[in-house]
Image: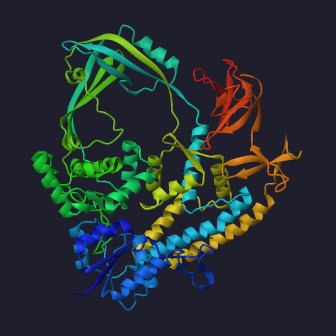
Amino acid sequence: MAKNLVIVESPAKVKTIKKFLGKNYEVMASNGHVRDMPKSQMGFDPDNDFEPKYITIRGKGELLAALRKEVKKADKIYLATDPDREGEAISWHLTKALKLEDKKVYRITFNEITQKAVKESLKHPREIDMSLVDAQQARRMLDRMVGYEISPLLWAKVKRGLSAGRVQSVALRIICDREEEISNFIPREYYTLDVVLGVKGERKPLTAKFYGTKDGKTDISDKETLDSIMKGLENAEYQVISVKNGQREKKAPLPFTTSTMQQEASKALNFSIQKTMRVAQQLYEGVDVKGSGTVGLITYLRTDSVRVSEEAQAAAVDFIGAHYGQQYRKKTAQAANKKSGRIQDAHEAIRPSDVNRTPSDVKDSLTRDQYRLYQLIWKRFMASQMSSAVYETTSARIGAGSYVFTASASRVTFDGFMLVYTEAEEEKEESSAAVSALTEDSTLTWKSFDEKQHFTQSAPHFTEASLVRTLEELGIGRPSTYSPIITTLLKRRYIVKEGRNIFVTELGEVVNNIMKESFPTIVDEHFTANMEGLLDKIEEGVVPWKSVVSNFYPDLEEAVKVAQKDLEKVKIEDEVTDVICEQCGRNMVVKYGPHGKFLACPGFPECRNTKPYLEKIGVPCPKCGKDIVVRKTKKGRRFYGCENHPECDFVSWQKPVAEKCPKCGSYMVQKGNKIVCANQECRYVLQ
């Protein structure tokens, strides 16, 4: 019998796939990439048409030797790496590293690791798609250019080993811009006014919201406006002007893509992006399920497509009809979302590989995290194939003198997909029997007013989920890059997480400022999104990959040369302080480290004394009168506190100023280019 060798990426897949194929197939793993550009140099030659140089990755020699041994025995070799650019490139590198040019080599892909999918892929082998390989090579070289050209400049500027990345630098700028927006935000006062009314014949009262006049909507922007409205409502009679009853549908959500899965797992399960991808990878590669052996539970996890195969749709519709009723089946088939016309298009939405394998069926075979994520994916996919939810709506306009109030409510008349799934943090629909019972003849009686003061809120701090959504909306990065972008920023200590929120560290601010000053194009979101579009064009075979690389490099090289000159002029010397080193008597200097500034003895290496750096801002503490200094949380977020800590517990997230509030006497803080009172009840703004 013919001997066949199947090479996959991950060792976790070997056991699963070997069970499907039997004794005539040997299955081995490459453990990811086997070749890469050398770490010690850029890895390509600009003078030789940007030809890349590849070497065997250190530590892969033994593995390649084992693969070559099996290659010699095999009649056919199937390269079954992941169905994306990275997987295609790994297959291409394997052909080079194993010298497979004279062998019968076939590229196969499958979107799910099931017996049917794997065996079907063997019936439809193809050649390696060089357009996909070229897109991966182009991305790798662009990232190399930015990292290897700019990182040494950051080292020179900040004096310690930092790094810049093509996409991570844009993500850092987006986060920094949001933090600046929050810091500069000045709250604006406004009011809301509700009226509580009794409805004749109804036990529960009705709450209506102030809308304005019959001429249009009126905003209550200050207390004077509210007082004027309240005066106009004295002794007013309330009567129903109009009631509209209607019906609306709420469509089922689309099945998960990589980014929507990451966002929903963050909100619903409190998973980090990295954890979501790690657990999803386990579900995709295969889990030992009692009674079934090792089974891949979900389809490929790196995708931006919402397309679902006809077979999977049919299976879902049959399941829904049998378990929930025919009325819950989706009325129309979901539109395909193919990005290209390739015969073996592997891009499908993330879904269960078998809808009949319910979360409860496999719960005992999964870890808690695996179960929770699988349940989320299963429910989302089933919901995507179900009918819309139907609501009965009522909206009413209520007149009171010259003013108008509105009331609305809705109730579910058919739950549809919501029988199975509702999104995390989804706003609950208002339901009020009093509103639903209103007619134009209803008799209303005033009971009370509910007036409230509010202040506008700044944009929220980014979370991992909202950052991924923003990157996707801007066209920055791709499904496989969202997790590495955030992981790298956290690892470099450019950002920190406190709870779910992301904050920029002082180190992140320094790096971002350098990038904006010297490399504005690199950190421009539109430029980066356009570059992602060009990579897609390479993948589609429309644009030659070397033309993209050769157009990018000269501009970057020129920017680096200019920055090198400027950086030499603005090179930061060590700042000498009045703090005396108790070990040798020298004045200590300010140094930069991975976690920001610190004090060090200039006598290094003879004297290695270091201390935390407490930067004074020249403002006395409002509580004890000593100096306020810049401090940091354990995770690197900056705040302001008294140097007399812990005896004095004064702290502030905003930078305090010396001026006192003329209105209430409290201390004031700097917000952007304005000075505002720190007292939440006062909120005085210094003009």
In the rendered view, tell whether residue 137 sits above or below residue 276.
below
Is residue 687 visible to us here?
A: no
Does residue 34 lie above or below 521 as drawn? Answer: below
Residue 643's spot in the image, x, y percent? 74, 32
The picture quadrant where one finds residue 99 is bottom left
Can I make out residue 494 in this image? yes
Question: Does 56 sit above or below residue 477?
Answer: below
Asked whether 105 or 56 is in front, the reply is 56
Looking at the rendered structure, the number of numbered marks drawn on it comes to 0
Farthest right residue in view: 585
Looking at the image, which is closer to me, 686 or 573? 573
Please name whichever residue, 281 or 464, is drawn nearer the observer in this view of the structure: 281
Residue at left 73%, top 35%? 629
For residue 639, above or below residue 314: above
- 465 sits to left or right of 21: right
Q: Residue at x 28, y 61 (%)?
A: 296
Q: Position of residue 485 (x, y in %)?
A: 51, 57
Colour mode?
rainbow
Residue farthest to the top?
235
Residue 87 screen position, x and y as percent: 40, 72
Give residue 510's position: percent from left, percent from top. Answer: 67, 51
Quadrant placement of the N terminus: bottom left
